[in-house]
Image (cartoon, helix red, strand yellow):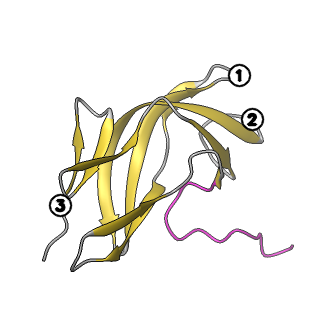
Amino acid sequence: MPTSVHQLDDGAWLSVNDTRQINVSDLWWLARHDFCSCEMADFLAEGFVDIGVDYPNIEGRIAGQCIECGESGVTDWLTLGRVVDPEAGRFFGVDPGSVHVPVRRRRLALPDE
C-alpha cells in the first residue's frame, strides 16, 4: 500500500495518509546549518515549502526565521519523520524541540575532528 504524503492548508501541515501529522509554528533547533550566522539557530517554522521522501524518511524544507538574529529564509532539507510500517502507513514524526541537522547525507564530523 503506498503512503500518501503532502502538505495542507498552504504549507501549514504535513499530511501522511490523509492525517495531519506535523504543523508549522513550532521552534526547531538547527545545528550545522547554513540558514544564518548563529551557531545554533532557534528557527520559527512558518510554512512547509517542499515535501519529499528519502525512504524511509519524510523530509521537508521549511520557511521561517531565526528568533535570535531575525534572519528569514528557507531551510535545507530536514527530516520530519519516518514511515515505519508502509503496509499499515504508520508514521513517527520527529520532535521539533530536538536538535536537527539540515542537509541530506551530510557528515556530522569534520575530517580533522
Reply above or below: 34 against 85.
above
| C-alpha separation, residue under disc 1 versus residue under disc 2 | 7 Å
Residue tagged by mark 2?
38
Q: Amino acid at mark 3?
A: Ser
Cβ atoms at labels 1 and 2 below 8 Å apart: yes
Q: Amino acid at mark 1?
A: Cys
| C-alpha separation, residue under disc 1 versus residue under disc 3 | 36 Å
Q: Foreground mark, 3 or 2?
A: 3
Cβ atoms at labels 1 and 3 below 8 Å apart: no
Residue extending farthest to the left is: 1
Quadrant of residue 41 within the rendered picture = top right
Q: Residue at x 56, y 52 (%)?
A: 95
Looking at the rendering, the stretch of residues picked out in magenta corresponds to 100-113
As helix, strand or loop, the secondary structure at mark 3 comes to loop
Q: Nearer the viewer, residue 98 or 53?
A: 98
Query: Magenta span has 80?
Result: no
Reply above or below: 47 against 60.
above
Q: Residue at x 21, y 80 (%)?
A: 87
Residue extending farthest to the top is: 70
Question: How many C-alpha atoms fall within 10 Å of the one at disc 1: few (<14), some, or many (≥20)?
Answer: few
Q: Residue at x 24, y 50 (%)?
A: 19
Q: Nearer the viewer, residue 88 or 107?
A: 88
As helix, strand or loop, the secondary structure at mark 1 comes to loop
Q: Which mark is residue 6?
A: none
As helix, strand or loop, the secondary structure at mark 2 comes to loop
Percent of width and height locating residue 88: 23, 75
Question: How many C-alpha atoms fall within 10 Å of the one at disc 3: few (<14), some, or many (≥20)?
Answer: few
User: Closer to the N terminus: mark 3 or mark 2?
Assistant: 3
Residue tagged by mark 1?
69
Residue tagged by mark 3?
4
